[in-house]
Image (cartoon, rainbow, N blue to C red):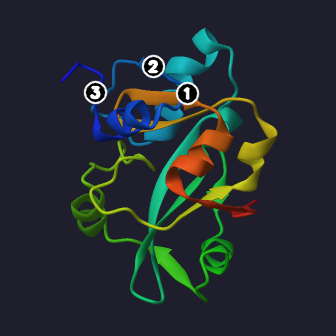
Amino acid sequence: MAASATPATTALKRSGIEHVVHSYDHDPRSQSYGTEAVDALGASLGIGAHQVFKTLVIELDTGRLAVAVIPVPCSLSLKAAAGALGARKATMADPKKAERTTGYVLGGVSPLGQRKILPTVIDESALTIDRILCSAGRRGLEIELSPVDLVAATNAVTAAITSG
């Protein structure tokens, strides 16, 4: 497997979706993986923070885990995400359960190539941008792709799921 190959990049390659993989040196002391990606790649790629998306694993009141993908500077509206996925309420998933279910470590959870495919909602703001970045499945590795392709590859719904 190539250095940048992850289940996420393998899934994109297999599906023929055009994408670019970007890497940066991850600082193990970093507390905000999304902000780290923005700081590391934003200037060199000429992109703003709203083009870099973070992947959050949530637990719906139905007991199922799901994925919410939102711009790094935004906060997730759990109620809106739950509603978009047909549930009444949601909470942030237990980190260990999220890692076990997706096959990724926190800070490297990708909406693509998960061990168990989870229902996904992507903030509708993604559709106003030509190219976005999201985790490639490892800290320090991001995928640049069309948001339309990300929606198709994850079979996601889009909705207004951010607050603030």
Query: Callout 3, which amino acid?
Result: Ala
Q: Amino acid at mark 1?
A: Glu
N-term-proximal mark, 1 vs 2: 2
Density class for disc 1 (Cα within 10 Å; few <14, some 14-19, many ≥20) is some
User: Residue 20 has which mark?
Assistant: none
Residue at coordinates 39% horizontally, 18% vertically from top-left? 24
| Separation of marks 3 and 2 at Cα, in angstroms | 12 Å
Local packing at callout 2 (Cα closer than 10 Å; few below 14, some 14-19, many 20+) is some
Vertical placement of residue 134 versus 64, above or below: above
- Report the residue at 69% width, 64% height from top: 161
Left or right, 104 with reference to 130: left
- Mark 3–mark 1 Cα distance, whole angstroms, equals 14 Å
- Mark 1 and mark 2: span between their CA atoms? 7 Å
Q: Position of residue 37 (x, y in %)?
A: 49, 29
The residue beneath circle 3 is 5
Q: Which residue corresponds to mark 1?
A: 144
Looking at the image, is 134 positioned above or below residue 57? above
Percent of width and height locating residue 97: 26, 69
Q: Extreme top residue here?
A: 44
**125 horizontally vs 44: left or right:** right
Q: Is residue 138 visible?
A: no
Q: Earlier in the sequence, mark 3 or mark 1?
A: 3
| Residue tagged 2 | 22
Residue type indicated by callout 2: His
Task: Tell me where residue 157 appears, x and y as whole percent.
Answer: 65, 63
Tell me the quarter of the image containing the C terminus. bottom right
Earlier residue among tags 3 and 2 = 3
Q: Secondary structure at mark 3?
A: loop
Front residue of this view, candidates 154 and 137 = 154
Tell me if I can see residue 82 in this picture. yes
